[in-house]
């Protein structure tokens, strides 16, 4: 009887373990299992007309299947290879169209609301947002993002009355004035003891080296050098170093000013959002995207001034027309899309304005799904591998579509030269002038040395007893009338 009870207890324990495994499988959010050891996932992907580099859905009508490719899908396929379990994918697209956005469907938010009733996971160019995290869970991002605007560029040169100052920055101009004054003062110090012979031809004219000429003397020598202006070799050495520095500065100034006056400068047609709002321009955004909410709620645009577009060619056509002729003055979208747009039409457009930051693109699952941690860890492994670079280069080239350098606005305007550009030459000039002063004014720095030596001999060696000397007194010899020393 005890054997029978043990067998019954073992059977009950086995059924409890099976029930526990079923419950754990249900709580993890994993879909139904098609075959033993393989987890089936219902995958939703966005289907739209434009930017197929991220998700491209091609339907096969005969077999009622879909061939999905693109950057996001390749990343997902790479991620599932790092999962600790095998999966079977059942992919089904969801249409993202502008005409359906008005009734609440046809948007990315509507796609995410299909979790978990229709999809177990949504894969694609889905942006991680705080309000979306209220009803779905996101994995870690696999690409950075952010909202920025692209505008048409203005070609031409903007010349002002102070354009001659632009080749050098203000700190470089100030440095030139300081070093010119220093060199003029140094030469004046070294030449102060030279005797002036104004009426003798070929002799240095000391009257030219007065305190009033300290500033303009080095500059005048750089422009109109006078051979007999200085007499000492040390002064000539300093002047030679200064002429070398002045030659480099003049050549650099000429080259940079020529670039400013001749090169075509690219400037954004609009620099900030206030200009677009105040002047009542129309702006565009990607249909079905959350960018519409950002423009209305964050950037305070009038909804009647917003126009939806779907493809990069539509962006180009609308920007080409302009706001006054049925198009738009700017297009707002996420940086990865704008970089794809600039790769096709970049010569006529430029990124401008502030950046509304977000976390980037990720995969969406149902709330509190344990699968989120598995996919996030797998995304980390993919992004840290060389495979991620290969996928980006496959669809976007070597430049990629990351958001790291979005703050930099491209322009062909030459930059002003700064102090750092000539810091080495300034250092050489300063050191050479300093040593020339030391050599030329040896009397000045030798006097303290002699005084220190005399003081050291007086006080450090004062204890040495003075040597005794034999005194010699003269005496008078009465015999021969001569004085003899005794």
Image (tube, rainbow, N blue to C red):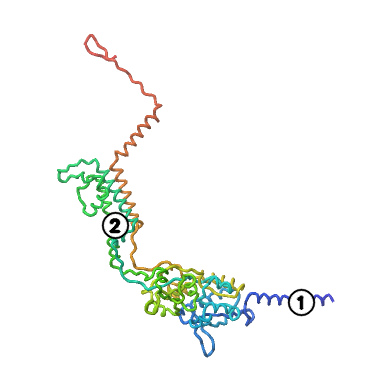
Q: Position of residue 230 (x, y in %)?
A: 22, 46
Regarding mark 2 in the picture, which secondary structure is present there? helix
Q: Is residue 252 visible?
A: no
Left or right of 224, for residue 384:
right
For the residues labelled 2 and 1, the Cα–Cα distance comes to 93 Å
Pick the front one: 52 or 354: 354
Residue 286 in picture, x, y percent from top left: 46, 77
Check whether the beta carbons of the residues at disc 2 and disc 1 lie within 8 A of each other: no
Quadrant in the picture for the N terminus: bottom right
Residue 379 image point, x, y percent: 54, 71
Answer with mark 2 or mark 1, whichever residue precedes in sequence: 1
Kindly tell me whether residue 270 is visible in this rendering: yes
Q: Quadrant of residue 425?
A: bottom left
Pick the front one: 262 or 225: 262
Q: Nearer the viewer, mark 2 or mark 1?
A: 2
Above or below, comparing residue 211 to residue 352 in the picture: above
Label annotation for residue 97: none
How far across and down, in percent of the image, does residue 127 sit? 51, 73
> Of helix, strand and loop, which one carries label 1?
helix
Q: Residue furthest top?
A: 479
Residue beneath label 2, please?
Answer: 249
Residue of label 1: 12
Depth check: 459 or 481 in front?
A: 459
């Amino acid at each position: 009887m005890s054997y029978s009870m043990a067998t019954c207890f073992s059977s009950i324990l086995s059924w409890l373990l099976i029930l526990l495994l079923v419950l754990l499988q249900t709580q993890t959010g994993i879909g139904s299992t098609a075959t033993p050891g393989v987890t089936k996932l219902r995958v939703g992907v966005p289907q739209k007309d434009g930017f197929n580099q991220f998700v491209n859905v091609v339907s096969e009508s005969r077999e009622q299947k879909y061939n999905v490719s693109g950057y996001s899908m390749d990343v997902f396929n790479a991620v599932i290879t790092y999962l600790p379990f095998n999966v079977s994918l059942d992919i089904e697209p969801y249409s993202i169209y502008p005409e359906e956005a008005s009734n609440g469907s046809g948007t990315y938010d509507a796609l995410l609301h299909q979790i978990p009733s229709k999809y177990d996971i949504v894969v694609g160019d889905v942006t991680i947002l705080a309000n979306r995290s209220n009803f779905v869970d996101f994995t870690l991002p696999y690409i950075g993002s952010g909202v920025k605007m692209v505008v048409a560029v203005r070609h031409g040169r903007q010349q002002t009355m102070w354009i001659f100052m632009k080749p050098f920055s203000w700190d470089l101009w100030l440095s030139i004035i300081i070093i010119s004054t220093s060199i003029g003062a140094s030469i004046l110090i070294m030449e102060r003891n030279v005797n002036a012979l104004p009426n003798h031809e070929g002799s240095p004219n000391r009257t030219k080296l007065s305190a009033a000429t300290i500033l303009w003397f080095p500059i005048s020598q750089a422009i109109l050098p006078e051979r007999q202006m200085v007499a000492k070799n040390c002064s000539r050495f300093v002047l030679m170093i200064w002429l070398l520095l002045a030659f480099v500065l003049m050549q650099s100034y000429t080259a940079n000013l020529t670039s400013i006056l001749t090169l075509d400068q690219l400037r954004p047609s609009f620099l900030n959002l206030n200009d677009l709002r105040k002047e009542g321009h129309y702006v565009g955004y990607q249909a079905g995207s959350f960018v519409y909410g950002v423009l209305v709620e964050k950037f305070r645009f009038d909804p009647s001034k917003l126009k939806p577009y779907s493809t990069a060619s539509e962006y180009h056509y609308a920007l080409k027309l302009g706001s006054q002729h049925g198009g738009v003055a700017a297009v707002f979208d996420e940086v990865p899309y704008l970089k794809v747009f600039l790769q096709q039409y970049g010569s006529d457009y430029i990124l401008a304005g502030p950046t509304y930051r977000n976390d980037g693109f990720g995969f969406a699952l149902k709330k509190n799904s344990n699968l989120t941690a598995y996919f996030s860890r797998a995304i980390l492994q993919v992004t840290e591998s060389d495979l991620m670079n290969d996928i980006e280069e496959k669809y976007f080239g070597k430049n990629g579509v990351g958001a790291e350098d979005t703050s930099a606005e491209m322009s062909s305007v030459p930059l002003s030269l700064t102090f750092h550009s000539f810091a080495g030459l300034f250092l050489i000039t300063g050191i050479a002038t300093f040593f020339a002063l030391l050599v030329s004014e040896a009397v000045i720095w030798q006097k303290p040395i002699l005084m220190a030596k005399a003081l050291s001999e007086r006080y450090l060696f004062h204890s040495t007893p003075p040597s005794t000397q034999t005194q010699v007194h003269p005496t008078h010899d009465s015999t021969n009338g001569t004085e003899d020393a005794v």
